[in-house]
Amino acid sequence: MNGDTLMSDKKPENLARRRGFFASLGIAGAAAVAVATTTAKPAEAMTPPGTKGGKHYSESEHVKQYYRVNRY
């Protein structure tokens, strides 16, 4: 075969070792995902400000006119 090796020519120990390596990679990846999902804090809902638009908002005359024209 001129130096080429076929799949059937490989030793079973190497194949078993390679399968074990990839299996351990899969298990490690699944464990990392499990840890990431269990340690994440749940998101908290935002509480809206008590006034319209917050501290930075001021209802000037042109804003009042806009609301009036557009019936907000």
Image: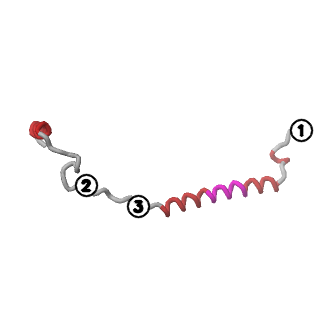
The local secondary structure at tag 3 comes to loop
Q: CA distance from mark 1 to mark 3?
A: 59 Å
- Residue 61 percent location from the top left of the image: 11, 39
Callout 2 amino acid: Pro
The label shown at residue 48 is 2
Cβ atoms under marks 1 and 2 closer than 8 Å? no
Q: Which residue is mark 1?
A: 3
Q: Main secondary structure of the magenta part?
A: helix
- Residue 68 percent location from the top left of the image: 9, 39
Q: CA distance from mark 1 to mark 2?
A: 74 Å
Residues rendered magenta in the picture = 20-28
Callout 1 amino acid: Gly
Left or right? Give the position of 11 relative to 29.
right
Please check the rendered image and state whether residue 23 is part of the magenta-colored stretch, yes or no.
yes
Q: Which color scheme does this rendered protein use?
A: secondary structure
- Mark toward the viewer: 1 or 2: 2
Q: Decide which of 61, 43 is in the foreground and name it.
A: 61
Q: Decide which of 65, 25 is in the foreground and name it.
A: 65
In the image, residue 65 above or below residue 11: above
- Residue 40 percent location from the top left of the image: 47, 60
Q: Residue at x 14, y 39 (%)?
A: 63
- Residue 72 percent location from the top left of the image: 13, 43
Of marks 1 and 3, which one's residue comes earlier in the chain? 1
Please check the rendered image and state whether residue 49 is part of the magenta-colored stretch, yes or no.
no
Q: Which residue is mark 3?
A: 42
Of marks 2 and 3, which one's residue comes earlier in the chain? 3
